[in-house]
Image: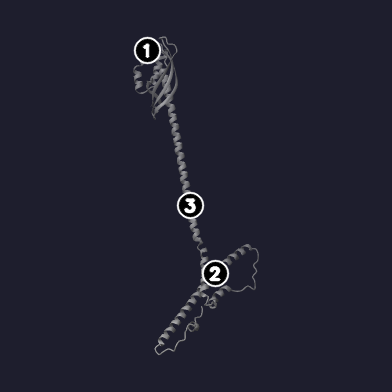
Amino acid sequence: MPTFRRRASVIDADRVDGPPEGPGKPADAADALALAEEAEAEAAEAEALAAAARARARAIRLRRQAQEAEGEAAAEIEANADAPEVASPDAPQGDTETSDVVAAPTQASPVDANNSDTEAIKKDIAEEPAEAEPAGKRRRWRAGRILKTLAAAIAIACTAALITLSVLMILNHRHQEADQQRRAQYAAAARQSVVTLMSLDFNKAKEDVQRIIDNSTGTFRDDFKNQADDFIKVTQESKVVTEVNVNTTAVESMSDDSAVVLVSASSRVTNAAGAKQEPRSWRLSVDVKRDGDQLKMSKVEFVP
């Protein structure tokens, strides 16, 4: 620590010779002297604080230089691991810079204490952000982690949306296939019902009528069964032979258990009245209904 001494220049240099003091002014002179001594003490205290700041700044610099030197020495030792170490006999013992730190306060000049200390402190403060760098790295690491998490969440959401869309498309495709399959089944059942109903041969009228009864259901079946004997008798008396071809079919409406099918058919009729292979065209509306595991005709109407 610096020595504190009273400097006569502080008092004598600023003193102005005046007229001899009168008998009533000794107290004023004593006060002035006390103020001067107080100012000198404050200046000495400021000098001591400046010296301490210089010592602290020098210690920080020395510590950093020692760390850098230690890192360089470690790198050199690692690079030259196989080479023998030769100690220099003339190497200085102790740390000269450390001794400078201890001696610095006594050798410092009071005149430039404030300027040199301010510059050293500013230099150390300018170098401090290097120590705060890990905090910035942590913030960048957290931001990167948040972005990665957000990107992963968006990727998962897009994947889930694509999977859902694919499932919906597959279900829709299966539903359409099921509808097409039911439509084809109803159309085939209506086609067969029309052929069974209109294909007659008086030689086997009973078999034809029984086939119509077996291929029908509901009210239509009950009504046709009640009139079966009369129908057989008329067919045999008129000696009717009918050949039927179905041209087109179209499903007008359908549900899970029933459908309405439009059928266009043509027939050739031969009977005892003189008709020989006479062509005729028919348009029919056939109601098809599911009866157990079969589709049967439940209603027939001729459409003009």
Residue 163 screen position, x and y as percent: 46, 41
Q: Nearer the viewer, residue 52 or 5?
A: 5
Q: Quadrant of residue 61?
A: bottom right
Residue 201 lies, with reference to residue 143, above or below; the image says above
**Residue under pointer 3:** 147
**Residue under pointer 1:** 234
Q: Nearer the viewer, residue 42 or 260?
A: 42
The amino acid marked with disc number 2 is Arg
Q: Quadrant of residue 173?
A: top left
Of the two numbered discs 3 and 1 on the same chain, state the one appearing first in sequence. Answer: 3
> In the orientation shown, which residue stands out farthest toward the front?
19
Residue 250 lies, with reference to residue 34, above or below; the image says above
The amino acid marked with disc number 3 is Leu
Of the two numbered discs 1 and 2 on the same chain, state the one appearing first in sequence. Answer: 2
Residue found 43% across the figure and 19% down from its top:
265
Residue 77 lies, with reference to residue 175, above or below; the image says below
Q: Regarding mark 2 in the picture, which secondary structure is present there?
A: helix
The mark closer to the camera, 3 or 1, is 3
Q: Is residue 223 left or right of residue 32?
A: left
Residue 104 screen position, x and y as percent: 54, 76
Residue 36 screen position, x and y as percent: 45, 82
Report, in whole angstroms, how far the alpha carbon at label 2 lies from the one at label 3. Answer: 40 Å
Of the two numbered discs 2 and 3 on the same chain, state the one appearing first in sequence. Answer: 2
**Residue under pointer 2:** 61
Q: Nearer the viewer, residue 284 or 118?
A: 118
Residue 95 screen position, x and y as percent: 58, 73
Colour style of the rendered protein structure = one colour
The amino acid marked with disc number 1 is Val
Residue 162 lies, with reference to residue 187, above or below; the image says below
> Do labels 2 and 3 touch, CB within 8 Å?
no
